[in-house]
Image (spheres, rainbow, N blue to C red):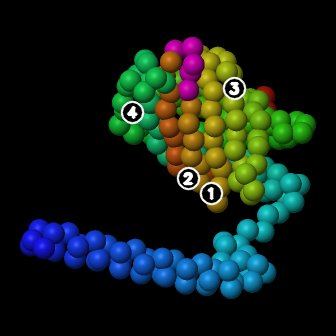
Amino acid sequence: MSNRERGIVIVAGIMSAVAWMATVVLAQERAKISAVPESSVGSILPAKPAVLSRADLEKRFEEELTGSTLTGVWQMTGEGGLSGQAALTAPKPDLYAIAKVSKVSDDYWVITARIQYAEKDVNFPVPVRVIWAEDTAIITLNDLTIPLLGTYSARVMIHHGFYSGVWYSAGKNYGGVMQGRITKTPDHAQNATKKPTE
């Protein structure tokens, strides 16, 4: 037998030994898994968080946002941004002063907000739908025309004093992202945003 043939036989033997050892190890691991009682499988999964009732969640949502200020940053794309062809701009200041949040029916709410965007500053009642992911509120807005600003859609998540979301204008093919903190507006600041007739 030549040296080459001997080498082939040795390599084949090593590969067979490795395959046999892998089979033994896998069999042992399967035996360990099958030995775990089904009743204990749940103990290795993350616990499902306790969630308040829908009525309590809605009450907390209304209290958190009424008389609050959302302060953070926003970024946007240029034209063609919804097709992924335009990069996001650098972050710019984001500010929404919310005077009141009230439920209309089912999942539908009205958020009366002072919207400051670029050089514009308007108070506007925004009709939205609020859906829930466990204890997290997600504000949804679809093709709403806001005077002086344009027509927009958005998805904004509200959770533990923070907001984060996306917005876009399908007609103009651009959009962006937003995020920040939710804080209570001081009483004097709330009064300053009210119209004289309110």
Which numbered dot is residue 181? 2
Q: Label 3: which residue?
A: 142
Mark 4 belongs to which amino acid?
Answer: Leu
For the question of whether residue 88 can be seen, the reply is: yes
Mark whose residue sits in front, 1 or 4: 4
Cα distance between the residues tagged 3 and 2: 23 Å
Q: Position of residue 107 (x, y in %)?
A: 84, 39
Q: Amino acid at mark 3?
A: Asn
Question: Which amino acid is tagged 2?
Answer: Arg
Mark 3 vs 4, N-terminal side:
4
Mark 3 neighbour density, 10 Å: few (under 14) some (14–19) many (20 or more): some
Q: Are marks 3 and 2 in contact (CB under 8 Å)?
A: no
Which one is in front in this view, the residue at disc 4 or the one at disc 2?
4
Q: Which residues are magenta?
A: 168-172
Q: Say which of 186 and 50 sits in front.
A: 50
Quarter that holds the N terminus: bottom left
Q: Is disc 4 placed on a helix, strand or loop?
A: loop
- Say if mark 3 contacts mark 4, CB within 8 Å: no
The tag on residue 161 is 1
Q: Position of residue 34 (x, y in %)?
A: 68, 80
Q: Nearer the viewer, residue 2 or 101?
A: 2
Q: Which residue is mark 4?
A: 88
Residue 179 in the image, given as x and y percentages of width and height: 52, 46
Rendered view: 99 above or below 180: above
Q: Residue at x 71, y 73 (%)?
A: 47
